[in-house]
Amino acid sequence: MTRPLVMGIVNVTPDSFSDGGRWFDPDAAVAHGRDLARQGADILDVGGESTRPGSRRPGEEEELDRVLPVVSALAGSGLRVSIDTMRASVAAAAIEAGAEIVNDVSGGLADPQMLPLVGRKGATYVAMHWRGHGDSMQQRAVYDDVVTDVCREMNERVEAALAAGIDPERLVLDPGLGFAKTAEHNWQLLAHLDAFSGLGYRVLVGASRKTFLGRLGGREEPVPPTARDAATAATSLLCAQAGVWAVRVHDVPSTLAALQVHEAVSAWTDEAAS
Ligand code: PMM
């Protein structure tokens, strides 16, 4: 398949910025995950911690209680599941319950046990660019040149991941849109995904419904998260053009349509080139 994979978001949280509370009940989360898969999601990303600035971190037990029944049910029905967590203990339990991918928004910085755990388990590992938890995050959105600085910091995470025994073939890098980034930083990173791919690893991008997409056209008051799916789909098309491995989205049909447009056009541009 030439198009990026679609990672559908299953947030089992009371407070995520876009869909907080909607799938907090485990049965509702499982049903939502199955819906996303039916719509064409290739991977389901199950998370129990909201990373929105100001949200309270759940305790370890609380996070496990949220995600494990959902991971077990989805993986048990043969779906490919990723666990969105910064905790090694949660990642370990989710792998045990059938998750194949660990999606760590801290790139191994939040929990020193995470990289060794993933190295031992041999799971696929998504390392996102991150500079700190919730409240302090936006104060850290200071860069000389965001593309160069993010690439350099990601290279450090790559070295740590490889030193911990993670197979380079199983490593995926994510520029972390919206995490210690202003809107301008997000746009610059999207404009230079080639620099990010140039690090030599698969790339995942999570632009879905983020605030910068709600402010298009110079709006001061952003449109609500659910009104950002067309803009999200447009970013998915940019990701396809840049050869990204996967896009993480809330709304699967709109992104899938954008990716199919790219695929259909690529068939003809590839033919012209050959
Ligand atoms: N963004 C969020 C959560 N997890 N994981 C990765 N790899 N990349 C992201 O950009 C990312 C993520 C925050 O969005 P949400 O609250 O809608 O899930």
Image (spheres, grey):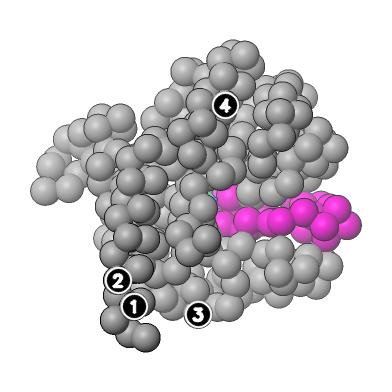
Between disc 2 and disc 4, the foreground one is: 2
Question: What is the secondary structure assignment of the residue under circle 3?
Answer: loop
Q: Is residue 112 left or right of residue 232?
A: right
Under mark 4, the amino acid is Arg
Contact, mark 3 vs mark 4 (Cβ under 8 Å) = no
Mark found first going from the N terminus, 2 or 3: 3
Give 5 or 200, whichever is nearer the viewer.
5
Residue named by callout 3: 198
Q: CA distance from mark 2 to mark 3?
A: 26 Å
Residue 55 image point, x, y percent:
50, 30
Between disc 1 and disc 4, the foreground one is: 1
Residue 151 image point, x, y percent:
50, 74
Between disc 2 and disc 3, the foreground one is: 2
Contact, mark 2 vs mark 1 (Cβ under 8 Å) = yes
Give 136 or 259, whichever is nearer the viewer.
259
Mark found first going from the N terminus, 1 or 3: 3
Q: Is 115 a magenta residue? A: yes
Span shown in magenta: 105-132
Residue named by callout 4: 34
